[in-house]
Amino acid sequence: MSWTDWIKAFEDDIKEPVGVIMELGCGDGTASLFRFANKVVSLEILDNEENNWLGRTKIPEGANWKSEFFLADGNYEITPKIKSYLSSRLRKYKPDLVFVDCGIHCRGAIVQYLFNKVNIIVSHDTGQNNHEGRKDPYGWELVKPPENYTHKFYTGLGTTIWKYNQNMSGEKLNM
Ligand SMILES: C[S@@+](CC[C@H](N)C(=O)[O-])C[C@H]1O[C@@H](n2cnc3c(N)ncnc32)[C@H](O)[C@@H]1O
């Protein structure tokens, strides 16, 4: 199992490249995202400045990549500042898909925040419920998908893909 086993899930599920992928947390896997989108925006969200991976992330020549560092005021819990930052970036970049793979741990709360705002939400490590002696470190128990989203789980460390189902709600997402 590897940190980048989510690539297999993308290959199985994202058959046509989307316009914009917004990735929360960058690293060795970021380069692969350009196979699934015309543009990738990486938001390196951390609660410390030392582990910033933006400078170490290798991007294919000529790729359409935007990146930002955001210093979060929380790690295991989502805060109003983190929500407000995400909200401004959703408005600015209008992503078709958000990939939640960030260094701060509140991934479940972030996924929950993104429902009804983003068409496709992907998160990694969704099979990890016990890590570093902490139960449910990523907060997956908080994820309660609305009825208008379908989801699929891929094994390995666990990758879950939630998709907005326009037919079920009858209207497009208004971002
Ligand atoms: C699990 S990584 C995932 C990053 C990216 N989506 C990927 O698949 O490569 C989450 C965070 O860990 C840090 N990170 C990235 N690559 C790393 C590595 N090889 N070793 C240690 N930390 C890393 C970065 O701060 C990143 O935001």
Image (spheres, rainbow, N blue to C red):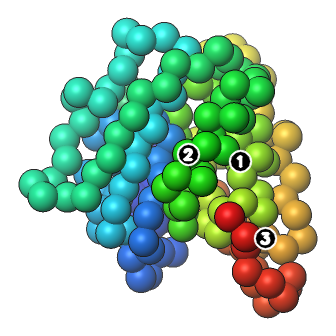
- Residue displayed at 36% across by 55% down: 40
Question: Where, quadrant-wise, is the N terminus in this rendering?
Answer: top left
Residue under label 1, please give it. Answer: 111
The mark nearer the N terminus, 3 or 2, is 2
- Residue displayed at 71% across by 35% down: 83
Q: Amino acid at mark 2?
A: Arg
Q: Position of residue 48 (x, y in %)?
A: 48, 11
Q: Does residue 170 appear left or right of residue 39 in this picture?
A: right
Is there any visible trace of residue 99 in the rendered image? no
The mark nearer the N terminus, 1 or 3, is 1
Q: Amino acid at mark 1?
A: Val
Q: Work out whether residue 121 or residue 95 is closer to the camera in this orientation and state it.
A: 95
Residue under label 2, please give it. Answer: 89
Cα separation, mark 1 vs mark 2, equals 15 Å
Q: Position of residue 123 (x, y in %)?
A: 59, 50
Per the image, label 3 sits on a secondary structure element best described as strand
Q: How many marks?
A: 3
Cα separation, mark 1 vs mark 3, equals 12 Å
Where on the picture, by quarter, is residue 152? bottom right
Dots 1 and 3: beta carbons under 8 Å? no
Residue under label 3, please give it. Answer: 149
Is there any visible trace of residue 114 in the rendered image? yes
Per the image, label 2 sits on a secondary structure element best described as helix
Q: Position of residue 41 (x, y in %)?
A: 40, 50
Quick one: label 1, few (<14), some, or many (20+) residues within 10 Å?
many
Cα separation, mark 3 vs mark 2, equals 22 Å
- Determine whether the beta carbon of the residue marked 1 sits less than 8 angstroms from the nearest atom of ligand 1: no
